[in-house]
Structures are given as structure tokens and as C-alpha cells.
Image (cartoon, rainbow, N blue to C red):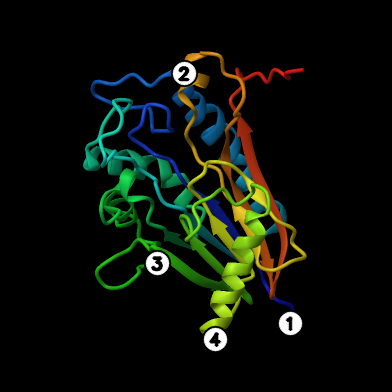
Amino acid sequence: MSDPLIADIVIGDMHIGHKTAILYPYDLEDYMPNIGQRWLYKDVWLGKLLPEVKAILKQHKPKYVHGLLGGDMGDIDLKKRSEQYWTKDINIIRDNANTLLDPFMELCDTVHVLKGTKAHTGQNSQVDEAIARNFDNVEKRNDAYYAWYKVDYRLGGVLVNAQHYGKNKSKWGEGNLVNALRDEIILERTKHSRSVPTVCYRFHFHWSYITSRYKKPIIAQVPGWQLPYDHIAQIDPVGRITEVGGLVSLYKGKEVVDMFPLNYYYPEVTCVLKK
């Protein structure tokens, strides 16, 4: 009997509460979502990502679907560094996130939720914890908590490691740092006689990067759902072009058989090449 196909749907860094991030744009008492937020929700979340995820699942027909929420799903600005927030109320953020995430969660048999950064989600990541508690298919960390600082989970024969970011907070795709991260994971696991994961998911930097599937562990950096302010306000939106989106991975036996990065770019952003 052949091994079943398993799907892993991965998203993170929604930062609900910030004026440059995605949100459920209805039933808001005193806030009008801006053009960037409307694009994130209507054009990308409803118009592209969810339909494309459903199309992948329909085409490949996995026997089991797992979801991973990578932390920083909401944002309460614990360090009070910005006024660019439409709310910092954890209850409003939780309710908005739950409505937004409903169609995603319905696609998944089980889901793991990661803790994000303290500066965005609270000292004990209470924003991510509050969001996780409202869904029945979330895998608990223990009897008291639902959100995980880091987690290993096995889907079929594939061991997955996930956390919002690692010890080295540098961007994994820059220079040789991704190789340093891979070596760090291998050495740490070997030292403590633990299995080396097949794939590792990381978040936090709001961009997409996937290493070769032929060298384990595969390192996958997953983008977020927040736009730079200059892109929305159209103030010289040149230079750093931030993608938003997620990732669908397919596992069979002990192998990652395919990975589908679902990356999208704000349409008004133009890139000017300097001579």
C-alpha cells in the first residue's frame, strides 16, 4: 500500500490591527480600511490565495490537510512604537482574525499556531494565543496553552520544524546565512540525539525564500500580509518590493514531493532600475 499524500498549508504575519496589514474589512465601527487593506483582503485573500489553495487540493487530492499559522497573526504594538494602528484591543483583533481565518481553518483537519514576537503580540504572545483558542481543530501545546513557541510535528514520514524565527534573527536568504541556519539545526539536533527535520518553516521577515529540496533540511521562509506604508500612500514606492501570501507543501512518505509558493505583489508598485 502506497503512502498517502498529505498537504501542509502555511501562512503567517498577518499583523491584524495595523493600518498596513490585512483585516476583515466589514463590521468595523469607526475605521475605514485603506486601499492597500482592501486589496489584501478582496483581491488577494479571497480572490487569489484561497482559490489557489483549493485548486491545489482539488488537483492533488491529499488524504490529510494540515495548517500552520506562523505567529504575529495580530498586532497590539506592545512597545508603543507607532500610531499606525486602527485598534490595539486584543478582543477586537481576535474577533476580526477569527472571521478572516474561518475559510482557511475549514480547509484543514488540524492546525498548529505559533507564537510571534513579544513586541507585536504581547509578553506571552497573548494575541496569537487568543486567536488559537477560538478554533476546534488547533493542536494544543498542553492543557493550558494552544500557541507554540516552536514545534516539531510529523506528517506521514516527514518531520516538520516550525518557529517564528530562530536564534539568528538575520534574514535567512541573505548571503550564506541560510546555510548557517541549516548547519545550526543539524548540529543542535545531532548534539541532543534528535532527528533532523525534513523541512523547517520560518516567518518574521515578510518575504519568501525556499532552499533546494535536494538538501535537507529544506528551509522555507514564508511571507506576511503587511505592506510597507509607502506602497499604500504612493510615496516613492521604489526599492524594497514586499510580497504577501503563503505556501502549500505536499508530503508523501518521507519526502517533500512539491512546494507551491503563493506570492503576490501590490499592483501599484513599480521598480525603477538605477544606472
Separation of residues labelled 2 and 1 (CA atoms): 51 Å
* Residue bearing mark 3: 139
Foreground disc of the pair 3, 1 = 3
User: On screen, 84 above or below 146?
Assistant: above
Q: Nearer the viewer, mark 4 or mark 3?
A: 4
Q: Is residue 194 left or right of residue 72?
A: right
**Disc on res. 209:** none
At mark 2, the secondary structure is: helix
Numbered circle sitting on residue 1: 1
Q: Give the mark toward the camera: 4 or 2.
A: 4
Mark 4 element type? loop
Alpha-carbon distance for marks 3 and 1? 28 Å
**Distance of label 4 from label 3 (alpha carbons):** 25 Å
For label 4, the residue is 193
Residue 35, label in figure: 2
Name which quarter of the figure residue 272 lies in: top right
- Relative horizontal placement of residue 243, taking residue 81 as reference (left or right): right
Q: Secondary structure under badge 1? A: loop
Residue 184 location (% of width, % of height): 58, 68
Q: Which image quarter is the C terminus in?
A: top right
- Name which residue type carries label 2: Ile
Kind of residue at badge 4: Ser
Name the residue furthest bottom: 193
Amino acid bearing label 1? Met
Where is 48 relative to 3, above or below?
Answer: above
Please give left or right for residue 53 compared with residue 26 in the image. Answer: right
Mark positioned earlier in the residue sequence (4 or 3):
3
The answer to which of marks 2 and 3 sits earlier in the sequence is 2
Residue 251 in which image quadrant: bottom right
Mark 2 surroundings: few (<14), some (14-19) or many (≥20) residues within 10 A: few
Q: Considering only order in the chain, which callout, 1 or 2, is on the residue closer to the N terminus?
A: 1
